[in-house]
């Protein structure tokens, strides 16, 4: 095998970001990817109806981090798509995350922005929860009360994580804001959109560098002995790297069921969540995100699952503790400057795309400075 200074294990967003940054500093980088394609979980492609779909579920790019936004814009032009979600509850399609409209629909009220806070306070006062909050449930109930918690969060969360929301970390609730106005966007970051030519094209542009080579369909562990790089950037599962020596971390997967329908539009929002009905959590209609025109439409149902590719880290105390043990091993390797562990799987963090890139940028920068 040719000589490489650096081996990046995994060709997803974190791995390709690190590869690009290191290649630009003159290092010869080899990316080894187990799947037959790059881009990891953000892989997208045009289906037979000519609609760009996300094979591993919907990904909407959003960030408030300037340097991350500048970085991705070097490799893709972004649309200004603003994501909207409706939640199907009580037989209605209702704004989600909770905003003023949500309250007015659920409770049949006509609250003004100024009245929302007091209304939610009353809902919370009627409710029981641990204070300070110790779980996902406690945080949500402390913000909106038990009624709204039950309607929008409890069952969705049970479906998504197959556990009691009281056993999930409080931090998970930080992903979902509560709004007192009528802003119905899912994200309010300054920058938001989709790469117009897709995420796969963005990743292909990222790795198009003379110092980057790619091996697809190869498990890094199977060729490890043939490589002798000065740095390994590992983006796979944290516990797997260490041979599960402290035990297995839990990952959550999703079974995606795609359907192309002979109709122009299927639903009234790009994503509709189903907290209380059916086995799936949500349905995505891709053309509403990409703006593509077609007489057909492609939708995707998400069925959370314990089996399958690792999509999510599981936010609970047991995994947090196990993670800490593995991170002590990581620290030894990183202090030796021989390894970097980056990304959702290797850092075992529920990263959004922008925080994965941010982490990769920061970690690579630190490694370069230490050398
Ligand atoms: N969630 C919920 N109801 C919803 C949407 C989300 O209870 O309608 C909870 C659920 O526990 C979920 C978490 O909030 O796992 C984070 O949701 P997000 O939309 O950020 O999940 P992702 O898009 O990463 O799957």
Image (cartoon, grey):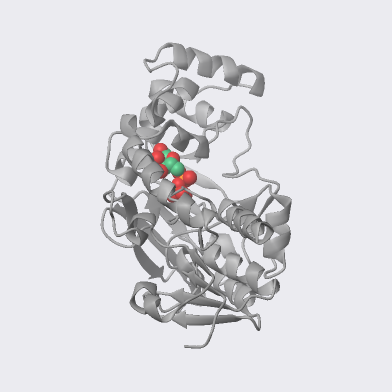
Position of residue 189 measured from the top left corner of the image (x, y, whole percent):
66, 45
Q: Is residue 272 visible?
A: no
| 146 to 65, vertically: above or below | above
Q: How many marks?
A: 0
Residue sticking out furthest to the bottom: 1
| 275 to 22, vertically: above or below | above
- Residue at 65% from the left image edge and 74% from the top image edge: 23
| 167 to 107, vertically: above or below | below
Q: Is residue 321 visible?
A: yes
Quarter holding the C terminus? bottom right
Ligand 1's quadrant: top left
Position of residue 356 measured from the top left corner of the image (x, y, whole percent):
55, 55
- Residue 157, picture quadrant: top left
Position of residue 151 measured from the top left corner of the image (x, y, whole percent):
38, 31
Horizontally, residue 13 falls left or right of residue 137, namely right
| 169 to 24, vertically: above or below | above
Horizontally, residue 24 falls left or right of residue 322, namely right
- Residue 238, picture quadrant: bottom left
- Residue at 41% from the left image edge and 12% from the top image edge: 126
- Residue at 56% from the left image edge and 69% from the top image edge: 16
Of residues 167 and 26, the one drawn nearer to the viewer in this rendering: 26
Position of residue 51 measured from the top left corner of the image (x, y, whole percent):
51, 72
């Amino acid at each position: 095998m040719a000589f490489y200074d650096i081996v990046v294990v995994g060709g997803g967003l974190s791995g390709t970001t690190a590869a690009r940054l290191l290649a630009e500093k003159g290092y010869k980088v080899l990316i080894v990817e187990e799947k037959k394609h790059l881009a990891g979980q953000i892989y997208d492609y045009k289906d037979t109806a000519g609609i760009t779909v996300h094979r591993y579920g919907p990904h909407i790019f959003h960030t408030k981090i300037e340097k991350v936004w500048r970085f991705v814009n070097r490799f893709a032009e972004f649309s200004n798509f603003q994501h909207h979600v409706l939640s199907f509850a009580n037989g209605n399609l209702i704004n989600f995350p909770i905003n003023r409209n949500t309250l007015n629909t659920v409770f049949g009220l006509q609250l003004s922005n100024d009245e929302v806070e007091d209304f939610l306070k009353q809902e919370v006062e009627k409710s029981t929860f641990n204070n300070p909050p110790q779980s996902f449930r406690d945080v949500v109930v402390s913000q909106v009360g038990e009624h709204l918690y039950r309607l929008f969060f409890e069952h969705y969360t049970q479906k998504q994580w197959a556990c009691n929301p009281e056993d999930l970390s409080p931090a998970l609730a930080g992903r979902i804001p509560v709004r007192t106005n009528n802003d119905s966007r899912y994200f309010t970051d300054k920058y938001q959109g989709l790469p117009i030519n897709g995420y796969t094209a963005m990743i292909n542009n990222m790795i198009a560098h003379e110092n980057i080579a790619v091996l697809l369909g190869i498990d890094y562990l199977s060729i490890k002995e043939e490589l002798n790089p000065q740095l390994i950037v590992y983006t796979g599962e944290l516990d797997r790297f260490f041979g599960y020596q402290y035990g297995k971390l839990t990952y959550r997967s999703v079974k995606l069921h795609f359907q192309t329908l002979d109709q122009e539009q299927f639903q009234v929002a790009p994503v509709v969540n189903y907290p209380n009905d059916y086995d799936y959590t949500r349905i995505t209609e891709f053309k509403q995100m990409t703006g593509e025109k077609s007489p057909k439409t492609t939708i995707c149902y998400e069925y959370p699952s314990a089996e399958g590719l690792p999509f999510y880290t599981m936010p609970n105390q047991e995994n947090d503790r196990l993670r800490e043990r593995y991170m002590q091993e990581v620290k030894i390797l990183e202090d030796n400057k021989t390894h970097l562990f980056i990304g959702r799987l290797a850092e075992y963090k529920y990263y959004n795309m922008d925080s994965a890139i941010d982490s990769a940028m920061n970690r690579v920068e630190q490694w370069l400075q230490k050398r």
